[in-house]
Amino acid sequence: MNTGFRSRKITTEQTGHNLWEYMLVAYPDGPVGDQVLMEKKYFFDEYREQLSARTLPYITIAYFMAKEEMEETLMRWIQRVCSSRESFVATLNNFSGFPPHTIYLRVQDPQPFRQLAKELHVIDGFVQSNGCPPVTLVTSPCLPIAGRLPQEVYEKAIADYSGRIFHASFVVNELVLMKRRSQYDPSAQVSIFRLPPGPKDIYN
Protein backbone atom coordinates (compact mmCIF):
# COMPACT_ATOMS: atom_id res chain seq x y z
CA MET A 1 0.00 0.00 0.00
CA ASN A 2 1.30 3.44 -0.88
CA THR A 3 0.05 6.26 1.30
CA GLY A 4 2.27 8.92 -0.18
CA PHE A 5 4.64 9.90 2.57
CA ARG A 6 5.79 13.41 1.82
CA SER A 7 9.57 13.75 1.68
CA ARG A 8 11.22 15.39 4.69
CA LYS A 9 14.49 17.22 5.17
CA ILE A 10 15.65 14.36 7.42
CA THR A 11 15.91 10.98 5.68
CA THR A 12 17.17 7.51 6.50
CA GLU A 13 20.05 8.17 4.14
CA GLN A 14 21.14 11.03 6.45
CA THR A 15 20.54 9.40 9.83
CA GLY A 16 21.51 5.78 9.18
CA HIS A 17 19.85 2.71 7.72
CA ASN A 18 18.70 1.36 11.09
CA LEU A 19 15.85 3.91 11.16
CA TRP A 20 12.40 3.53 9.65
CA GLU A 21 10.04 6.33 8.65
CA TYR A 22 6.68 6.20 10.46
CA MET A 23 3.51 8.18 9.86
CA LEU A 24 0.29 8.22 11.89
CA VAL A 25 -2.63 9.04 9.62
CA ALA A 26 -6.41 9.24 9.40
CA TYR A 27 -8.09 7.91 6.26
CA PRO A 28 -11.47 9.26 5.08
CA ASP A 29 -14.19 6.62 5.12
CA GLY A 30 -15.43 4.82 1.99
CA PRO A 31 -17.79 7.38 0.40
CA VAL A 32 -15.62 10.41 1.18
CA GLY A 33 -12.48 8.50 0.27
CA ASP A 34 -14.05 7.71 -3.11
CA GLN A 35 -14.83 11.40 -3.64
CA VAL A 36 -11.24 12.32 -2.89
CA LEU A 37 -9.94 9.62 -5.21
CA MET A 38 -12.09 11.11 -7.96
CA GLU A 39 -10.40 14.47 -7.34
CA LYS A 40 -7.00 12.79 -7.52
CA LYS A 41 -8.00 11.13 -10.79
CA TYR A 42 -9.13 14.50 -12.13
CA PHE A 43 -5.73 15.93 -11.23
CA PHE A 44 -3.94 13.11 -13.02
CA ASP A 45 -6.15 13.45 -16.12
CA GLU A 46 -5.48 17.18 -16.25
CA TYR A 47 -1.80 17.32 -15.28
CA ARG A 48 -0.47 13.76 -15.83
CA GLU A 49 1.29 13.67 -12.47
CA GLN A 50 1.61 9.97 -11.60
CA LEU A 51 2.17 10.43 -7.85
CA SER A 52 -1.26 12.01 -7.40
CA ALA A 53 -2.97 8.97 -8.89
CA ARG A 54 -0.96 6.32 -6.96
CA THR A 55 -1.40 7.48 -3.38
CA LEU A 56 -4.34 6.89 -1.06
CA PRO A 57 -5.99 9.93 0.56
CA TYR A 58 -4.95 10.58 4.17
CA ILE A 59 -4.52 13.27 6.82
CA THR A 60 -1.21 13.17 8.71
CA ILE A 61 -1.23 13.55 12.50
CA ALA A 62 2.41 12.69 13.26
CA TYR A 63 5.61 11.76 11.45
CA PHE A 64 8.76 10.35 13.04
CA MET A 65 11.78 8.16 12.49
CA ALA A 66 12.55 5.27 14.82
CA LYS A 67 14.28 1.94 15.18
CA GLU A 68 12.11 -1.07 14.51
CA GLU A 69 12.70 -2.46 17.99
CA MET A 70 10.99 0.65 19.40
CA GLU A 71 7.65 -0.21 17.75
CA GLU A 72 5.98 -2.02 20.65
CA THR A 73 6.65 0.81 23.09
CA LEU A 74 5.55 3.42 20.56
CA MET A 75 2.33 1.53 19.88
CA ARG A 76 1.53 1.36 23.60
CA TRP A 77 1.96 5.14 23.92
CA ILE A 78 -0.14 5.82 20.82
CA GLN A 79 -2.87 3.43 21.98
CA ARG A 80 -2.99 5.15 25.37
CA VAL A 81 -3.51 8.53 23.71
CA CYS A 82 -6.13 7.24 21.26
CA SER A 83 -8.12 5.44 23.95
CA SER A 84 -8.56 8.76 25.77
CA ARG A 85 -9.91 10.64 22.71
CA GLU A 86 -13.43 10.25 21.27
CA SER A 87 -14.23 9.87 17.58
CA PHE A 88 -14.87 13.19 15.85
CA VAL A 89 -16.11 14.62 12.58
CA ALA A 90 -13.62 15.92 10.02
CA THR A 91 -14.96 18.22 7.32
CA LEU A 92 -13.03 18.81 4.10
CA ASN A 93 -13.88 22.19 2.60
CA ASN A 94 -12.42 23.29 -0.75
CA PHE A 95 -8.79 23.48 -1.84
CA SER A 96 -5.59 25.36 -1.12
CA GLY A 97 -1.87 24.83 -1.67
CA PHE A 98 1.64 24.82 -0.23
CA PRO A 99 3.75 26.75 -2.75
CA PRO A 100 5.40 25.59 -4.86
CA HIS A 101 4.61 21.86 -4.75
CA THR A 102 1.35 20.64 -3.08
CA ILE A 103 -2.40 20.95 -3.71
CA TYR A 104 -4.59 19.90 -0.78
CA LEU A 105 -8.09 19.79 0.66
CA ARG A 106 -8.55 22.06 3.67
CA VAL A 107 -9.68 20.67 7.02
CA GLN A 108 -12.41 23.02 8.19
CA ASP A 109 -11.87 22.49 11.93
CA PRO A 110 -8.25 21.54 12.65
CA GLN A 111 -8.64 21.56 16.45
CA PRO A 112 -9.34 17.81 17.04
CA PHE A 113 -6.26 16.89 14.99
CA ARG A 114 -4.14 19.45 16.82
CA GLN A 115 -5.33 18.11 20.16
CA LEU A 116 -4.38 14.58 19.18
CA ALA A 117 -0.98 15.82 18.02
CA LYS A 118 -0.47 17.73 21.27
CA GLU A 119 -1.13 14.61 23.33
CA LEU A 120 1.14 12.53 21.09
CA HIS A 121 4.02 14.83 22.01
CA VAL A 122 4.62 12.38 24.86
CA ILE A 123 6.40 10.02 22.42
CA ASP A 124 8.92 12.68 21.39
CA GLY A 125 11.08 12.25 24.50
CA PHE A 126 11.22 8.48 23.99
CA VAL A 127 12.12 8.86 20.32
CA GLN A 128 14.86 11.41 20.93
CA SER A 129 16.29 9.51 23.90
CA ASN A 130 16.93 6.62 21.51
CA GLY A 131 19.01 8.76 19.19
CA CYS A 132 16.26 9.53 16.65
CA PRO A 133 15.23 12.91 15.21
CA PRO A 134 12.41 14.88 16.90
CA VAL A 135 8.81 13.88 16.15
CA THR A 136 6.97 16.11 13.66
CA LEU A 137 3.42 16.80 14.86
CA VAL A 138 0.67 18.32 12.72
CA THR A 139 -0.14 22.00 13.18
CA SER A 140 -2.05 22.55 9.93
CA PRO A 141 -3.85 19.29 9.08
CA CYS A 142 -4.83 18.85 5.45
CA LEU A 143 -5.50 16.12 2.90
CA PRO A 144 -3.05 16.24 -0.02
CA ILE A 145 -4.41 15.83 -3.55
CA ALA A 146 -1.05 16.07 -5.28
CA GLY A 147 2.48 16.78 -4.06
CA ARG A 148 6.07 17.07 -5.24
CA LEU A 149 4.81 19.07 -8.20
CA PRO A 150 7.05 21.03 -10.54
CA GLN A 151 6.52 24.72 -9.84
CA GLU A 152 4.98 25.40 -13.25
CA VAL A 153 2.45 22.59 -12.72
CA TYR A 154 1.64 23.88 -9.23
CA GLU A 155 1.01 27.40 -10.46
CA LYS A 156 -1.35 26.22 -13.18
CA ALA A 157 -3.14 23.80 -10.83
CA ILE A 158 -3.66 26.25 -7.96
CA ALA A 159 -5.37 28.67 -10.35
CA ASP A 160 -7.66 25.83 -11.44
CA TYR A 161 -8.38 24.55 -7.92
CA SER A 162 -9.10 28.00 -6.49
CA GLY A 163 -12.39 27.80 -8.41
CA ARG A 164 -13.27 24.17 -7.63
CA ILE A 165 -15.76 23.27 -4.90
CA PHE A 166 -15.48 20.35 -2.48
CA HIS A 167 -17.34 19.77 0.78
CA ALA A 168 -17.63 16.44 2.60
CA SER A 169 -17.53 15.14 6.18
CA PHE A 170 -16.53 11.83 7.72
CA VAL A 171 -16.04 10.42 11.21
CA VAL A 172 -12.47 9.81 12.34
CA ASN A 173 -12.83 6.67 14.45
CA GLU A 174 -9.36 5.19 14.00
CA LEU A 175 -5.77 6.16 13.26
CA VAL A 176 -3.37 4.02 11.26
CA LEU A 177 0.37 3.74 11.83
CA MET A 178 2.36 3.19 8.64
CA LYS A 179 6.08 2.68 8.06
CA ARG A 180 8.58 2.45 5.22
CA ARG A 181 12.33 2.13 4.86
CA SER A 182 12.84 5.34 2.88
CA GLN A 183 10.92 7.85 0.79
CA TYR A 184 11.51 5.67 -2.28
CA ASP A 185 9.89 2.55 -0.80
CA PRO A 186 6.24 1.50 -0.48
CA SER A 187 4.74 1.84 2.99
CA ALA A 188 3.24 -0.94 5.11
CA GLN A 189 0.59 -0.89 7.82
CA VAL A 190 1.91 -1.41 11.33
CA SER A 191 -1.22 -1.06 13.50
CA ILE A 192 -4.71 0.45 13.77
CA PHE A 193 -5.72 2.46 16.85
CA ARG A 194 -9.44 2.82 17.54
CA LEU A 195 -10.95 5.95 19.03
CA PRO A 196 -13.87 5.41 21.45
CA PRO A 197 -17.30 6.32 20.02
CA GLY A 198 -18.36 9.93 20.35
CA PRO A 199 -21.90 11.21 21.02
CA LYS A 200 -24.67 9.62 18.94
CA ASP A 201 -25.45 13.00 17.41
CA ILE A 202 -21.84 13.47 16.32
CA TYR A 203 -22.92 14.70 12.89
CA ASN A 204 -25.20 17.39 14.30
Image (cartoon, rainbow, N blue to C red):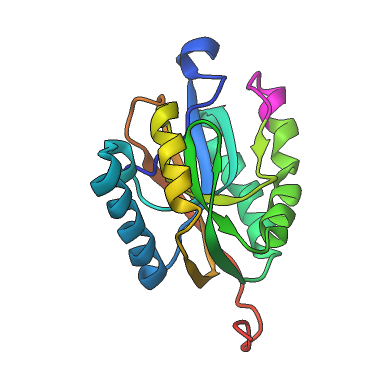
Q: How many marks on residues?
A: 0
Say which residue appears at 65% left-offset and 35% top-offset: 136
Quarter of the image with the C terminus in it:
bottom right
Residue 132 visible here: yes
Task: Determine which quarter of the picture holds residue 127.
Answer: top right
Q: Above or below — where is 183 with respect to 173?
A: above
Q: Main secondary structure of the magenta part?
A: loop
What range of the chain is rendered magenta? 127-134
Q: Does the magenta stretch include residue 188?
A: no
Residue 1 visible here: no
How far across and down, in percent of the image, does residue 59 sit?
52, 52
Quarter of the image with the N terminus in it:
top left
Say which residue appears at 41% left-offset and 53% top-offset: 57
Say which residue appears at 66% left-offset and 22% top-offset: 130
How far across and down, in percent of the image, does residue 154 sit?
44, 36
Say which residue appears at 54% left-offset and 46% top-offset: 24
**Viewer-nearest residue: 44 or 159:** 159
How far across and down, in percent of the image, does residue 55 sit?
34, 45
Q: Above or below — where is 117 with respect to 172?
A: above
Judge left or right: residue 130 versus residue 182.
right
**Viewer-nearest residue: 5 or 181:** 5
**Viewer-nearest residue: 81 or 12:** 12
How far across and down, in percent of the image, does residue 142 sit?
56, 51
